[in-house]
Amino acid sequence: MLELRQVSKSFGDKHVLKEISMQVEDGELVSLIGPSGSGKSTLFSLVGGLLTPDSGDIYLNEEQITNKSGFISYMPQQASLFPWRTILDNVLLGQELQGEKDAERAIAMLEKAGLGDVVHAYPHELSGGMMQRAAFIRALLSPQSIMCLDEPFSALDEFTRLDMQKWLLSIWEEHDQSILFITHSIDEALFLSDKIVILSANPAEVKEVVNVPFARPRDEEILLTSEFLQWKKDIIKIIQGDMH
């Protein structure tokens, strides 16, 4: 379990995060959503040990990891694959950094992702969606128990994005990793998440935590239901209440 306890962060006079407390349970997918500039990426940098909070602490499985790196796997907005490494070598990178390598498992996962024909290709030979799938598998193969995904599908067109969301769910539901997911899309948050943490504008505070009621496994048909639309309206109201 990942837990943030009263975490605050400022940059000079700019107060970005204010006493953020939240949890990601084992095997849970939690989305962070809020206005642009509300400190979501800063929060990721704190969890990853790239930044030090001004106050508060971060725990992973009851162990304090504040200001420590190497405890999470991370997938940024862009696939960030090394152009000189093959797709297989790219997805093995996280394991290599931890001193282990399981090429057989990596190839099996690439095949499941529809990338079996390009394991020895280079990133420039792949489409955007294919590169994002490879980047996700790299994060999933890393030995850390929690993944931080920073708007991984925001650069994709709407149809590719939905395909990637469905693909992420199908792959993730077979594994036991926890995911902390940044998105600006309420539809995406509702479709993917067990729980949505809604942040206010600067300084960001936890405005509300929404427990998503939809059972798993999920199907895209849920996106068209009246219940889904009502939850979307409710979340918009929570977010807009911060803007007036």
Image: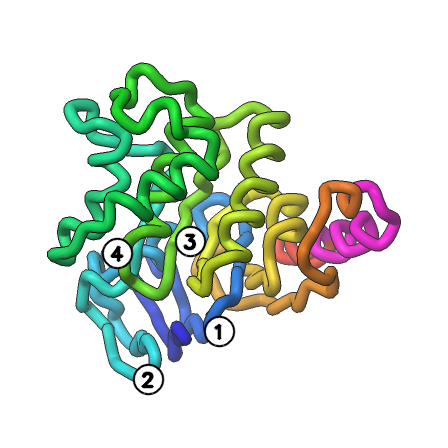
Which numbered marker is on residue 62? 2
* Circle 3 crowding by C-alpha within 10 Å: few under 14, some 14–19, many from 20: many
* Circle 1 crowding by C-alpha within 10 Å: few under 14, some 14–19, many from 20: some
In this view of the protein, which residue sits in the foreground, 104 or 118?
104
Q: Secondary structure at mark 4?
A: strand
Which numbered marker is on residue 11? 4
* Residue 2 percent across, percent down from the top left: 39, 72
Q: Secondary structure at mark 3?
A: helix
- Evaluate if marks 2 and 4 touch, with contact meaning CB atoms under 8 Å apart: no
Gap in angstroms between the C-alphas marked 1 and 2: 12 Å
Disc on the earlier residue, 1 or 4 = 4
* Circle 2 crowding by C-alpha within 10 Å: few under 14, some 14–19, many from 20: few
Gap in angstroms between the C-alphas marked 3 and 2: 23 Å
To which residue does mark 1 refer? Answer: 25
The amino acid at mark 4 is Phe
Gap in angstroms between the C-alphas marked 1 and 4: 29 Å
Closer to viewer: mark 2 or mark 4: 2
Furthest residue in direction right, as rendered: 226
Q: Main secondary structure of the magenta part?
A: helix
Closer to viewer: mark 3 or mark 1: 1
Residue 171 is a magenta residue: no
Point 73% across, 60% down: residue: 214
In this view of the protein, which residue sits in the foreground, 172 or 203?
172
Q: Quadrant of the N terminus?
A: bottom left
